[in-house]
Image: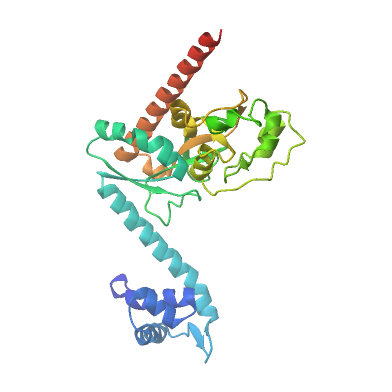
Amino acid sequence: MSRDLLPLNALRAFEAAGRHLSFTRAARELGVTQAAVSHQVKGLEDRLGVSLFTRTNRALVLTEAGDNFLPVLSAAFDSIDAGLRRIGRESRQDILTVTAMPSFTVRWLIPRLYMFREKHPGIDVRISTEDRPADFVNEDFDLGIRYGPGGWPGLEAVPFLTEDIFPVCSPSLLKGRHALRRPSDLRHHQLVHDNFSITWRMWLMAAGIGDLDYMRGPSFTDSSMALEYAAEGRGVALGRTHIVRAELESGRLVKPFDISMPTNFRYYIIYPPANAALPRVQAFRDWLLEAARAEEQDLAAAEAGSAVNAA
């Protein structure tokens, strides 16, 4: 069959109907009538000389021929879609699409984003916040920021920030009858949880506290909510170096104990290898690395200053 004679509308109708096993749902997806989908599929079957569906009163069932053809056609449409997305990304040199975690975006990235804008005024950044795995196939992202041990199959992963974990609370919890002076005093306060992988059980074990109910206390799906709850004086949350720095410097949150737990996790810049050559991706990656180096040098200087003052 010549390519210029390919019945593309009929192929789209069959592929949608085959995925949904429904002419009605396929019609809804394609924005046409159910009768139009049925007509296109019937025309394709007549052209091929085989039945692609067995039609019953209650169901639409793929025949053997239809079952064999559907994955081939779906893969072809997926490949076309990926190509169109790639062309679109390459043509939009002035727009960078980023996926990043909510807490990191609000507490670290946004306060510094103006510096990227000043350095690259011709690039507009579009940020989508989410914690789930980054989907570069089905979503139009140039680059992602994720936290973890590394190892994202099929993606370039560049580490750029490390951090420690430690309890944080409102200054009000350092006073009164059950003031926080040592880790064992946590038994008098609510432990605030979030969906971060480092749990209270792990920190308490590292601190040598094994007889405390680490499951009690409220739980939040986002670190920012947990930290806000702690800042209101309602409990003690686990803070991360770069997420709570602003609150620690302002005094809204404090570290009740001088015990921090290092982790093997890092923040990573991730992107498909095909995106590595895009100038906007290179610019944002290099800026993130530069900002991270400046941040860690600043933190090291602050710690050195604290040590000198303590001495």
146 or 311: nearer the viewer: 311
For the N terminus, the quadrant is: bottom left
Report the front residue among 65 and 53.
53
Could you say which is closer to the camera, residue 195 or residue 44? 195
Residue 138 position within the rendered picture, expressed as x and y whole percent measured from the top left: 42, 57
Residue 144 shown left or right of residue 239 in the figure: left
**Residue at image point 51% right, 14% down:** 306
The residue shown at (52%, 9%) is 308
Viewer can see residue 220: yes
Residue at point 53%, 28% (across, down): 254
Q: Name the image quarter holding residue 112.
A: top left
Residue 244: x %, y % from top left: 49, 33
Residue at image coords 51%, 37%: 231
Of residues 121 and 225, the one nearer the viewer is 225
- Image quarter of residue 137: bottom left
Q: Where residue 68 sits in the image (x, y, percent)?
A: 52, 73
* Residue 101 visible: no
**From what the image shows, is residue 146 above or below residue 168?**
below
What is the tally of numbered marks visible in this picture?
Answer: 0
| Residue positioned most to the right | 211
Q: Split into 4 quadrants, where in the image is the C terminus?
A: top right
Residue 184 to residue 300: above or below: below
